[in-house]
Amino acid sequence: MAKKGALKASEYLKKWIPFAKMRYVVFAIATIITMVLPWIKVNGNHFILLSFENFKFHFLFIKFDMQELYLMPFLLMLLFVGIFGITVLGGRMFCGWFCPQTIFRVIYRDLIETKILGLRKRISNKQKEPDYSKPINQVKRVIAILMWTVLATIATSNLLWYFVPPEQFFEQIMHPSENGVLFGTLVGTVAFLVYDIIFLKDNFCIYVCPYSRVQSVLYDDDTIMAIYDNTRGGRIYDGHDKTITKESQLAPDDLCTTCESCVTVCPTHIDIRQGLQLECINCLECVDACTTVMAKFNEPSLVNWSSIQEIDVRDRKTNFFRPKIIGYGVILVGLMISLVMMGLEKELMLLNVNKDSRLYDIEKVDGHLRVENSYSILIQNTQNEDHEFYVKVEGNDKIKVGQPSHPFKLKAGEQKKKTLVLYTTNMLAEDMRKDTMLQLKLKAYALDSNDTIKVYRDIRFTYPREDIIQKKMK
């Protein structure tokens, strides 16, 4: 901020970049990224896609089967810890700068109602609702609702593209009778957005969203937020009965003009001069409003994006590297490292092996005993191409694969259930007291992948005790 009397109002405002303009840039970037990401594919995989229809999860252009959803808890923890960390650092920045509810309200109130249709006179006055008693305004409201309904449909479709790929979405939505769940979700969500943005409005942030209740627990004296400096501006509210002070009652050195520009511009209808309130979403429009007014007096704004530490203790600065922030940072870095490492360890095919209830079978073949162990295996080709697969056993050369005896083909995404039979005709143990458990490794692999598509599983081969072998030999 400029020092007292350092610049004329016109010069000062030329150097000032309104937070509102910065928010619009953030809104635009977030919207573009959100709209474009579902259309980007690498090797047929999306950046992020949770397909319930195909039981697939795409993340960072890597495709995971639903059986590999061990990544989801890490993503959810990353989301919540990230939002909580942002709150400790910068208050409800997520609400004011990234939340879809806020972005949608800005589009409807500031763009459609104010700029396009002129239902509201000024963006700077969000307290006065349009006068719908006039017939022309009633017509404009219908137009505004129709315009928002179209935008809500686009926004909902965009959301659904993260569950149904765009190439499938447009094909399925043209046949609503055959895709009732998708069509119903689209219509229901659009209806909710119309009600929420046009009728419920910012009351969603005040009464419905639980985040405002959580923030009070996370704040501390170093949290950055919109704060009114009552030391410079004067105490506008009495601490007991909340009675507003008139301009004539302020001390001569108090700078607040009681113009209430910071009040009329607030989208959640609060007075920032009253102190910290749950309804504040840190949009910082009150900072812009006060900056514009106080610049006329060549004074810095009385409402700043600062911390209680800086406002109450003048010679102290906000501590950005306090234990809370460092702790959240460490947790976030740990979660991201874990997420990346687990993602890189993704297997290129799936293999589940279950031992049959019968421990073994023994039969006499050409004078030799043949001991068999049977397993049930489920093998899935998670690639986007067809492959030919085979299985073999490692760890003991005397144990062979009896079934499946030949390679088998799996189409892209296809899975098959097979019976695996391992056998031996050799004497592998001579234990009279108990059966012997032999540790083996089962390898399943694609024959046409140069040994890149493969997976290993640890299994046990049960060899009968010696008295059973001797009895079968007779």
Image (tube, rainbow, N blue to C red):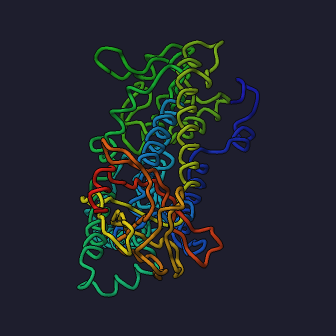
Instruction: Say which of 129 and 168 sits in front.
Output: 168
Q: Residue furthest toward the front? A: 474
Q: Quadrant of the N terminus?
A: top right
Image quadrant assignment for residue 172: bottom left
Residue 311: percent from left, percent from top? 56, 19
Residue 171: percent from left, percent from top? 39, 85
Instruction: Say which of 302 and 437 sits in front.
Output: 437
Residue at 58%, 53% (x, y): give it.
Answer: 26
Instruction: Say which of 430 and 463 sits in front.
Output: 430
Residue 344: percent from left, percent from top? 59, 54
**Callout count:** 0
Image quadrant assignment for residue 140: bottom left
Kindly tell me whether residue 390 is visible in this rendering: yes
State left or right for residue 386 relative to residue 378.
right
Residue at 75%, 40% (x, y): give it.
Answer: 11
State left or right for residue 4 relative to residue 325.
right
Image quadrant assignment for residue 366: bottom left
State left or right for residue 397 relative to residue 359.
right
Residue at 62%, 75% (x, y): give it.
Answer: 449
The image shows residue 351, relative to residue 217, as above or below, that is below
Residue 250: percent from left, percent from top? 47, 16
